[in-house]
Image (spheres, rainbow, N blue to C red):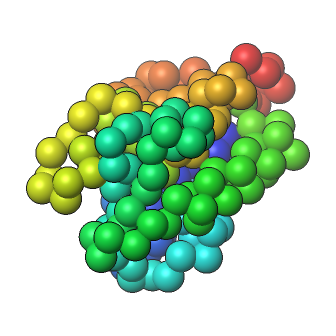
Amino acid sequence: MIIISACLLGRNVKYSGGNNLVPWLAAYYDARIFLPLCPECIARLPIPRPPAEIKKGTGQDVLAGKARVYNKNQEDVTRAFLYGAATALNLARSHKISAAILKDGSPSCGVSRIYDGEFHGRCQPGQGVTAALFWQYGIPLYSEETLTEAVLQELLARERAGKIF
């Protein structure tokens, strides 16, 4: 199976109550192959909720205890993000996930970039908390911004053939 950020399929789980639908990606959705999830929803954060950013670090830093996740109200939500990431990893392991397609820019799912923790709309290189944990466990990561249809078709072909990376 392949994990996919639920917001990319049009599910209204985004902090604002909306989604990040990617129509061409959603057209490939097959419940036998894709496992949609939102680590922030798994952590029982409400919808809508204040936006959150990693302050002074990346997802790797949060996992190492060197950075924290705060929402725009300056409430520390690190514990919820760690819980969501750990639960998502447990789901990935139990479903024998071969790859993850995640929402770039997210403090949970960011694959190559996240916001800088100042709530000014500036991004920095780095992964979100869940993406960083998946990476540590060797799960190949793709973002909706860099994934091509050709690569997705290759992932789906491998999945249907039962080949694990």
User: Horizontal and vertical percent for residue 156?
Assistant: 63, 31
The answer to whether residue 62 of the structure is visible from this angle is yes
- Mark yes or no: residue 156 visible: no
Identify the residue at image location x=75%, y=37%: 97
Q: Is residue 48 above or below residue 59?
A: below
Q: Quadrant of the N terminus?
A: top right
The percent position of residue 29, horizontal first and vertical second, equals 57, 52
| Among the 4 quarters of the image, the one containing residue 92 | top right
Q: Is residue 148 above or below residue 75?
A: above
**Foreground residue, 74 or 128?**
74
Q: Nearer the viewer, residue 65 or 131?
A: 65
Residue 3 position by quadrant: top right
Residue at (53%, 76%) from the top-left corner?
45
Taking the view exactly as shown, the residue that stands out farthest to the front is: 66
Q: Is residue 101 left or right of residue 161?
A: left
> In the image, is 67 to the left or to the right of 90?
left
Q: Quadrant of the C terminus?
A: top right
Question: Left or right: where does residue 161 sit relative to residue 49?
Answer: right
Q: How many marks?
A: 0
Q: Quadrant of residue 50 in the image?
A: bottom left
> Residue shown at 74%/56% (left/top)?
87
Seen as rendered, the residue at the extreme right is 94
Q: Does 68 appear above or below 143?
A: below
Residue 139: percent from left, percent from top: 66, 28
* Image location of residue 58, percent across then percent down: 41, 37
